[in-house]
Image (cartoon, rainbow, N blue to C red):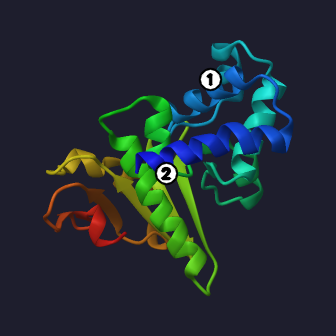
Amino acid sequence: MWINVYRRGNYLERDLQALSSITALPDFRRLMRAACLRLGQIINQTEIARDLGLPQPTVHRWLNLLETSFLLVRLPAYSVNRTKRLIKSPKLFWGDVGLAAHIAGESRLGGAYLENIVLHDLLCWRDARQQPAEVLYWRTAAGEEVDFVIETEGRLLPIEVKATTRPRLKDAMALRVFRLEYGEVSRAGLLLHTGTETKWLTADVLATPWWTVC
């Protein structure tokens, strides 16, 4: 595993540098670490630029480069208006969860890394389908958020990921808010956790181990 991480690290530093003529390699490394420390968060390029002391256009260009190279994944926000999905700020994930943990210096992987793993499985499922499907996230102005929303065949499936072995009713709150917002268009919510039990937390939220569906 560590050999693969080392080789991919070489790719990040050598091949990407050649691809885009990056000259400030230490700054690029700091940007990658900042991105890895923000897994599952909404991308704020201005904030990243300020924290790193870099020009915002540089941060913008380097993030685009990482995304073009399939190292960074931007998850769009769900909106009924499809044009707004292109305007709303996406959430940031990484193309390789192990590499992200290595760059971030994390030895214990929390909920954001589990979200990242689930996202990769959802994207693989999406890309293998014959019928079109979209994988998005949902967030309100009040801060209510659902990790993933699957849109397919005119229906919505809200999914929440929790790094807990014993999901509780409070863990389903955002899913229930989403269901109230979108009514019959929304399927029953799915709460993925790290335990072993599958059960209905409420009449419209099913809790199940994440590895049973991914």
Lower position in the chain sequence, tag 2 or tag 1? 2
Of residue 76 and residue 70, the one placed in the foreground of this image is 70
Find residue 97 and report its horizontal and vertical position in percent: 46, 48
- The structure residue drawn at horizontal position 60% and vertical position 55%, both measured from the top left corner, is 78
In the foreground, 204 or 40: 40
Can residue 42 be seen in the rendering of this structure? yes
Residue at image position (16%, 51%) is 165
Q: Secondary structure at mark 2?
A: helix
Q: Quadrant of the C terminus?
A: bottom left
Is any part of residue 180 visible from this angle?
Answer: no
Pointer 2 residue: 4
Check disc 1 and give the amino acid type.
Arg
What amino acid does circle 2 point to? Asn
In the image, residue 21 lies at what x, y percent? 86, 35
Left or right, 118 with respect to 41, comes to left
Using the rendered view, name the quadrant where residue 53 is placed: top right
Classify 111 as above or below 95.
above
Crowd tier of the residue under label 2, counting other residues whose Cα lies within 10 Å: few below 14, some 14–19, many 20 or above: few
Circle 1 is placed at which residue position?
30
- Relative to 142, 198 lies left or right: left
Q: Nearer the viewer, mark 2 or mark 1?
A: 2
In screen coordinates, is 203 left or right of 17?
Answer: left
Residue 126 figure quarter = bottom right
In the image: residue 170, left or right of residue 94: left
* Count of numbered marks: 2
Residue at mark 2 to residue at mark 1: CA–CA distance = 21 Å
* Residue appearing at x 71%, y 52% in the figure: 69
**Residue 20 coordinates in the image, percent (x, y):** 84, 40
- Taking the spot 41% from the left edge, 59% from the top edge, the residue there is 118
Instruction: Estimate the x, y position of residue 207 in percent, counting from the top left.
Output: 23, 62
Q: Secondary structure at mark 1?
A: helix
Q: Are marks 2 and 1 in contact (CB under 8 Å)?
A: no
